[in-house]
């Protein structure tokens, strides 16, 4: 695996791969990799010939009171994991390469960025859309792979790519879970062993709601979300939001139907975790 | 000259040219072409092997009370002019091809979009940045040529391209003027013959201010702009703004120096005209 830090070198490396006729896949990450990220790298490997991964903890997607400074990092381990998973190029840019002095351009996907996670994390998806577009422009991949846990992110990126005519195919990989059912996340490492065990209730509650829906017990969104809130609350979690939404427009539905999404964000301790399930 | 209306066909045509090793230049326009546009096409011709021009009256850069509906069009004449100027491909997309149903993504160059023309035309440069990025993503040119009359536009596009790592070289072509000195603009056709004659005062006033500066009479921005306001006012024009700014950041300067820009927008009748001069 080759590691480059400058935009110029990243471009040159990818350009050489392309001139050899290789298909390029790209997995953007913020590092501190877990099995979820690695599963995306393997999907990239499967669909393409040359796999680029980026590690960049993007400041523009963190709010002023969020965890940018203490976001976990472990470059040594990440490097070993990526090599083993079959990465060809790791792009690990400096902050100044990505956001030079006087930086001022942002991409906004209106209407999808202010709901769900966007309502409690103002500006978050503007930062996400901006960095992803920049990385696409640098790497120019044929396809890019995102994790399904960050469902809203993938919807916004698909929309951005479609709207701005970016020539890249967006794929999503399934959420990888710990044995307890807790969705894998770099932020899980913030949790004490007790909170980590308790946080498994998030996915249990989502499954419980889905089972209720499938059995025909209820299609009322507020009944479904009420059940989830109660289960998470009983285990000491604090729900930030839980909503039954249309999976394309992320708009709340009046009556739940097959294919709709239940999305949830909840705090365990000070750690905010997200998850989702398709009905 | 080939004319295409769909994004797919535009991409295919450019892609064929590129695979023949040709260098691609691009001139985006809103049509109703004049000598100013054609001079940009000739610059494109000079620096590249394959010249693409787009004609698209972009609704997102017009304000609600602006002249979108009555913006002048003359496709028949435009086609003849472009053929003569040496255009290879005319991309003339439909509104729905560019802004499909549910369109929601916008590019904002913060800090440069709210000053000068941006302060009286809210949202204008968001629309400009968005359409130009879309067109760049469709055409993927090696270089693109913009007119110097729209100075703020070219500054914003340079910044966007730099910030978002778009691989295109931005060039600007000099302002082409009518015999009277009036900067050529599609909007000049809104003017009665009398107003058209009067509007020539804009450039006369700019030159007068520059002469005053060069002779060392004054470097005080308010003296320079005061002179311009007076001259335009005396000829029946209504100044929207006139400002001495730094040509990169478009910020007003405290003391004018060589290389600074005087930018002006003024109404003659209901028609808003812009122009600028470098000190």
Image (tube, coloured by chain):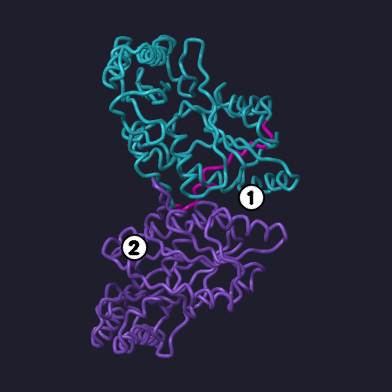
Chain colours: A cyan, B purple
Which region shows up in magenta?
A: A87-104
Whether residue B116 can be seen here: no
Distance CA(mark 2)–CA(mark 1): 37 Å
**Neighbour tally class for label 1: few under 14, some 14-19, many 20 plus, Cα within 10 Å:** few
Q: Secondary structure at mark 2?
A: loop
> Residue B246, position in %: x, y?
41, 68
**Neighbour tally class for label 2: few under 14, some 14-19, many 20 plus, Cα within 10 Å:** some
Q: Quadrant of residue B220?
A: bottom left
Whether residue B94 can be seen here: yes
Q: Quadrant of residue A86?
A: top right
Q: Which residue is mark 2?
A: B62
Q: Residue A132, which numbered label?
A: none
| Mark whose residue sits in front, 2 or 1 | 2
Residue at 64% x, 71% y is B47
> Residue B276, position in %: x, y?
40, 77
Q: Residue A8, which numbered label?
A: 1
Q: Secondary structure at mark 1?
A: helix
Main SS class of the magenta portion in the image: loop
Q: Chain of mark 1?
A: A
């Amino acid at each position: 695996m080759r590691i480059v830090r400058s935009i110029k070198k990243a471009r040159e490396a990818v350009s050489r791969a392309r001139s050899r006729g290789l298909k390029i896949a790209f997995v953007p990450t913020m590092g501190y990799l877990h099995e979820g990220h690695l599963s995306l790298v393997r999907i990239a490997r499967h669909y393409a010939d040359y796999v680029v991964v980026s590690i960049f903890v993007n400041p523009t997607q963190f709010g002023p009171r969020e965890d940018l400074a203490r976001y976990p990092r472990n470059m040594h381990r990440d490097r070993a994991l990526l090599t083993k998973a079959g990465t060809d190029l790791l792009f690990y840019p400096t902050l100044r390469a990505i956001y030079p002095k006087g930086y001022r351009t942002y991409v906004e996907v209106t209407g999808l960025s202010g709901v769900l996670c966007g309502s409690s994390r103002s500006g978050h998806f503007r930062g996400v859309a901006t960095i992803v577009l920049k990385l696409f422009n640098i790497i120019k991949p044929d396809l890019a792979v995102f994790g399904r846990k960050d469902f809203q992110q993938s919807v916004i990126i698909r929309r951005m790519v479609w709207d701005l005519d970016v020539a890249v195919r967006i794929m999503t990989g399934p959420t990888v879970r710990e044995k307890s059912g807790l969705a894998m996340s770099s932020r899980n490492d913030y949790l004490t062993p007790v909170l980590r065990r308790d946080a498994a209730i998030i996915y249990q509650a989502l499954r419980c709601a889905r089972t209720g829906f499938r059995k025909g017990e209820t299609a009322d969104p507020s009944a479904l979300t009420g059940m989830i809130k109660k289960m998470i609350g009983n285990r000491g979690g604090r729900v930030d939001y839980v909503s039954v939404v249309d999976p394309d427009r992320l708009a709340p539905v009046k009556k739940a139907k097959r294919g709709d999404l239940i999305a949830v964000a909840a705090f365990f301790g000070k750690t905010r975790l997200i998850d989702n399930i398709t009905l």
